[in-house]
Amino acid sequence: MTLKLNAKHVIDEIPFLDLKSQQNKIITQINKSIKRVLDHGKYIMGPEVFELEEKLASYSNVKNVITCSSGTDALMMVLMAKQIGPGDAIFLPSFTYTATPEVVAILGATPIFVDVLFDTYNIDAKSLLKSIGIAKEHGLKPKAIIAVDLFGQPSDYNALEKIADENKLWILADAAQSYGAEFFKKKVGKLAHATATSFFPAKPLGCYGDGGAIFTDNDELADTLRSIRVHGKGEHKYDNVRIGLNARLDTIQAAILLEKIKIFDNELKVRQNVADYYNKMLKNIVQVPFVIKNAKSAWAQYTIQLPDKSFRETLMSELKKVGIPSMIYYQKPLHLQTAYKQFPKSNSLTVSEEISEKVLSLPINLKHSSYITQKFCEIFKKIFEN
Ligand SMILES: Cc1ncc(COP(=O)(O)O)c(C=O)c1O
């Protein structure tokens, strides 16, 4: 669609996520890769699945990678492998996507919502400590922390590890948005007891359907996860040693990811360049993203904070008029969602509540970065002055 802005300025509507341009760069290789799968016909657990697991393990420097059907299943499989169930408390941020607490609730355990930090949007260690006490008051057994690396930035795993060790908890990293990111020069996948990521198309490393993976250095956990992925198999598929799932990654999706991983580092660089440019152009008027020392974000989203909700609404609609889409991740923290009202409210979750009214994510778009920031500044000033 082409928008006419004025006589001089005509621009194509900017996609929030430009997957088409990325696809155009590698379409020949992708077609060849898919054709290879069609030729050998091993659509389920074909050789590309294992090749991809090896590539991902070497990329993240971890011993085991278990690919699976989605980021949600990756989270759930780890909880299943650790036998999480009724009576167990799992600590996770309220400001995240519903998949994070959903898997906990499906297994009959209790998600305990923890507040996040105002600047990084990741779990707040102080709020976590309070939540552990509250879980015990409710007669629950504190078992694990699910740390979400929101918008692509790793959580502060050093701070979390300390609390985990002191309270005999283990950490599952929800890295659905942060694959490719780093913390103290270690890649995501290596930062927690187990890490779950998503290959949903919009993620930093996305396939062309649903997909996910789990990373762990623990061989025993990895074996259990491989069993859970195929209906709790033992020696073979028809030897059922535990309750499992059908949670395999399709061979075709693995074949696509094998091509996409070749350009992944370059894609991350482009995202970083766009984020640097946006920071430079916008830092004087809005709160731009804050990345902690020794961390590198995968920039799944570029998220700013605005003065308030009504300012955000006006800005979004004015941006839309000039062809710039924007998104709100997330409009409501999860402890306020109907689905989660039944769970004990841990402590004050005011930061999650406040930022859900202020955040706005802008398209990470190299081609239009100058147009986006220029129009953003013009519109922002106009609204501010009114
Ligand atoms: C933080 C977080 N966790 C988990 C998921 C679930 O991933 P998937 O959509 O692959 O199931 C997502 C997906 O958006 C996510 O953003």
Image (cartoon, grey):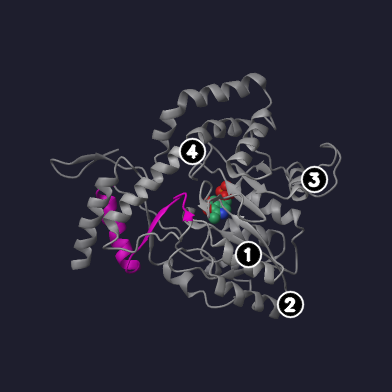
Going by the numbered disc 3, the residue's amino acid type is: Gly
Q: Hey, which residue is sitting farthest bottom in the picture?
A: 137
Q: Which residue is mark 2?
A: 139
Residue 161 got which mark? 1
**Which is closer to the viewer, label 4 or label 3?**
4
Quick one: quadrant of the N terminus? top left
Give the total number of marks visible in the rendering.
4
Q: Which of these two is toward me, 371 or 322? A: 371
Q: Residue at x 47, y 39 (%)?
A: 265
**Which is closer to the viewer, label 3 or label 1?**
1
- Left/right placement of residue 308 relative to residue 264 reads left
Q: Secondary structure at mark 2?
A: loop
- Give above or below for 161 relative to 367: below
Please report contact status of discs 4 and 3: CB closer than 8 Å, yes or no.
Answer: no
Going by the numbered disc 1, the residue's amino acid type is: Glu
Cα gap from disc 1 to disc 4, whole angstroms: 29 Å
Q: Which residue is mark 4?
A: 264
Q: Secondary structure at mark 4?
A: helix
Going by the numbered disc 2, the residue's amino acid type is: Gly
